[in-house]
Amino acid sequence: MPSIEQIQYVKAPIGKVFAALTTEPGLAAVWTDRLSVTPALGAVNTFHFGEGKPDRMKVVAFEPDRRVIWECIDSDPQWIGTEISFELEQRRDKVAVTLKQEKWRAVTEFYRFCNYNWGVFLLSLKGYCEDGKGLPYQDRKF
Amino acid sequence: MPSIEQIQYVKAPIGKVFAALTTEPGLAAVWTDRLSVTPALGAVNTFHFGEGKPDRMKVVAFEPDRRVIWECIDSDPQWIGTEISFELEQRRDKVAVTLKQEKWRAVTEFYRFCNYNWGVFLLSLKGYCEDGKGLPYQDRKF
C-alpha cells in the first residue's frame, strides 16, 4: 500500500517538538487553530479545516519524546484507516522527525496534495519550534 | 521503484508558472540562485546547493505550458538516474502543477528529506508566481 514518508530536522529541545505534535497549543500553532486535543493514549482528537466535518484521529501510540501514532477514524474517505506517525530521534543538536502516513489505498491526486501539505506541516513545525511562528491552515493561501 | 509525487495549485497565468520552472530567473527565485539554465530540450542545467559539486539536469522533455522533464545526470548518487517531471494543467482560475521524481531505488532517509523539500519547493513556486516572493535555498533555514 502506498505511504507518504518525509523527514524534517528541528533545532529545538525534543520535549518541545513532542509537545508541538501532541498538545492543543502546539497543534493549533502548527496545523489548525480549530481543534480539540488530549495528549494521551486512546484519546480521539479532532481537527477542523474549512467547512464540513472535522477530521478525527485516535491516538494509538503515545511514547513521550519518542513517537505518537494516530489512526484516522473520520475524514475524507481516502484518509479513513490510514495511520499517521511521528517518530522523534535526537541527533546531536537536532531532532529528526520522521512523518509517515501509511495504508493509503492508491496514489491519487488527493494523495499528491496531502503529500505536499505534509511538507508544509513539517516546515510549520520547524518554524514554530525554532522561532515561535508556525504556519497553520488559517494563515495559509490555497 | 519508489516515486515522490506531489501536486500544487497556483493562481497565476500558466505561462508564468512554466517560466518559473524552466528559466534562470524563475528557478533562481524558486530553488537556488546559483544556477545555469537554458530553457530548451537537450540543455543541461546546473544547480548549486551549499558546497560540493552542482546537480546537473538534462532537459529530456520540454513542451511549453504543458510539461518539462529533467533527467538527473549528476548529483547525490541516489538522485542520479531519477527523472523529475513537472506537468501543468489549467483548472479554471488555477494551474495544477504535478511534480514527480521517479526511479528512486529505495525509500531512504534521503528520499524522505527530498520529499519534504519538494513540498517546500512547491510552496516557493506558489509564493513566487502569486506574490513575487519565492523561498530559494539561500533564504531557508536548515
Image (tube, coloured by chain):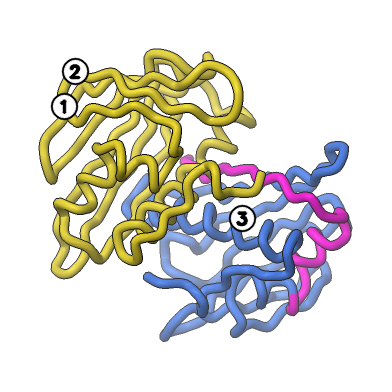
Chain colours: A yellow, B blue
Most distant residue in the left direction: A64
**Residue A40: mark:** 1
User: In the visual, does A76 lie left or right of B42?
Assistant: left
> Disc 2, disc 1: CB below 8 Å?
yes
Query: Pointer 2 indicates a residue of which chain?
Result: A
User: Marks 2 and 3, how far apart in space?
Assistant: 35 Å
At label 1, the amino acid type is Ala
Residue located at (68% from left, 83% from top)? B36
Residue located at (59% from left, 29% from top)? A50
Residue that badge 3 annotates: B122
Q: Nearer the viewer, residue A112 or A52?
A: A52
Q: Are marks 2 and 1 on the same chain?
A: yes
Query: Pointer 3 indicates a residue of which chain?
Result: B
Residue that badge 2 annotates: A42
Residue located at (45% from left, 57% from top)? B114
Q: Are marks 2 and 3 on the same chain?
A: no
Query: Pointer 1 indicates a residue of which chain?
Result: A
At label 2, the amino acid type is Gly
User: Marks 2 and 1, how far apart in space?
Assistant: 6 Å
